[in-house]
Image (cartoon, grey):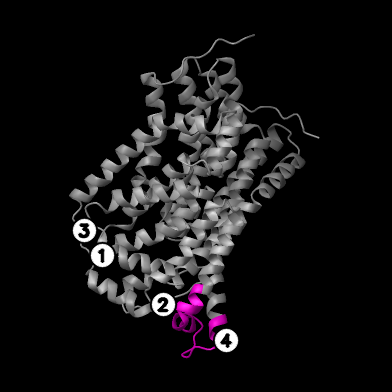
Amino acid sequence: MKQNVRIPHPLIAVIPLVVLVALIVLVINLFPDDALAGASQVALMTASAVCVAISMVVYKVKWHTFEQMIMGTVGDASVSILILLLIGMMSATWMISGVVPTLIYYGVQFMSPIFFLPCACIISSLISVMTGTSWTTIATIGIALLGIGDALGIPSPYTAGAVISGAYFGDKMSPMSDTTVLASSVAGADLFKHIRYMMYTTVPSITISLLLYLIIGLWYDGEAMEINQYLTGLDNAFNISLWTLVVPVFTGFLIYKRTPSLITLLLSALAACFCALIMQPDVLAGIAGETTVTAKSLFMGIMTTCYTKTHVNTGYEAINDLVSTRGMAGMLDTIWLILCAMCFGSCMVASNMLKSITQVLLKAITNTVSLVCSTVTSGVLLNLVMGDQFLSIIMNASMFREEYMERGYKPELLSRSTEDSATVTSVLVPWTACGMTQSTVLGIPTLVYLPFCFFNIISPIMSCLVAVLGFVPKPEKSEK
């Protein structure tokens, strides 16, 4: 069934990627606040069209080849799309139920502006290690930390960078993480050996990141909002109570029991809805546009919170923006973008253009350093092309696995190099599922928080540096 497609010349293969990057740069410059509303999607579809046109005209690739690849790739992304919708629902219900406002209310009273960024990074790391997912960490505790940072006068991009750095460090080091399990299994490495081997690069990377966040805290002279004003605004709008924290405790229990992600997110959102009915009836009535609490207003308030935008008046504009939510509808632009990114990645694979580019990297391998650097470069490149973290991990480990085996290297070296690149840099690319999801959840454009995601930036560099310094196992002789 698979057509024998010719491999294009590398200079031809990079044309769609160059077109995409050029269009994305234009889109970000011309639509800085609305890039997700459609312009980025059009850029991806245009680049896909360029890829298909070159392949069909020059290399005589049949349309059926592209169609089958797109159908398979988009089908594989269906679970991720459902997860995105549930994240939108959960983050909204956690806010309106009072969970996030309560965390912010008490957090601003204990946090210091100087140590806030390293603390935010450490907290996100611990939560992510325990949950095994960076997405859930950022959508829950990340939003609360963003609010605390605003109250302390820390710019949102700084906080977002610290939260993302910590969340992705914890995600990599957690045996419950799907990316960690995926990378080790595709590379053929033992899971716990893979995690231990990653410590050679992840520990130095997170240590440097924490030092940089501490330096920012020491030198940044931000104007903190009056804490009492912040507390008053939250207290006026919500029923602040430690009882609301039953919801995150319940969510943590589900994660501890290794409940599937879809079920965990749904049950967590439903628990928050129940909490809102008990703790925030006036808020729900206000969202429904009613002045009195009735069964009708409560039902309308819950439904509105779950699926669309909500606004709660706290008496302070800055706090109003913080506690506003978008529900499942707020994730639709992200889902649209992911589908277009999947289409582009599928076309690049079906046309063999991606294979052509990666073969250039394989030809450059002469020793251990070039092998690791090629793997890392490939992981970053795949994120730029594929638009999906999981596809990038699978393809990167698959492409280099035979090369590592032939040279006698342990599979942990391959899995670590893949994680140091494909896993952590996905959130830095504006058109990947990770980049767009975190941008949507945090309300900050990807390229705005990118410079402050120190761990994600340092990790691929550290992976190459460790190889240069020789901290890799010596290759074993092949038994051929």
292 drawn magenta: yes
Residue 7 screen position, x and y as percent: 66, 27
Contact (Cβ within 8 Å) of mark 2 with mark 4: no
The residue drawn where x is 47% and y is 44% is 171
**3D distance between C-alphas at marks 2 and 3:** 26 Å
Within 10 angstroms of label 2, few (less than 14), some, or many (20 or more) residues? some
Residue farthest bottom in this picture: 292
Element under disc 1: helix
Residue 442 screen position, x and y as percent: 42, 58
Q: Is residue 439 above or below residue 312?
A: above
Q: Amino acid at mark 2?
A: Val
Q: Amino acid at mark 1?
A: Gln
**Which of the marked residues, 1 or 4, is nearer the chain's N terminus?**
1
Q: Amino acid at mark 4?
A: Lys
State which region is magenta.
Answer: 275-299
Report the residue marked by disc 2. 312
Within 10 angstroms of label 1, few (less than 14), some, or many (20 or more) residues? some
**3D distance between C-alphas at marks 1 and 3:** 17 Å
**Which of the marked residues, 2 or 4, is nearer the chain's N terminus?**
4
Q: Quadrant of the C terminus?
A: top right
**Which of the marked residues, 1 or 3, is nearer the chain's N terminus?**
1
Report the residue marked by disc 4. 296
Disc number placed over residue 218 in the picture, else none = none
Relative horizontal placement of residue 55, taking residue 308 as reference (left or right) = right
Residue 300 screen position, x and y as percent: 56, 81
**Which of the marked residues, 1 or 2, is nearer the chain's N terminus?**
1
Disc number placed over residue 109 in the picture, else none = 1
Tell which tag, 1 or 4, sits nearer the viewer: 1
Within 10 angstroms of label 3, few (less than 14), some, or many (20 or more) residues? few
Report the residue marked by disc 3. 222
101 drawn magenta: no
Element under disc 2: loop
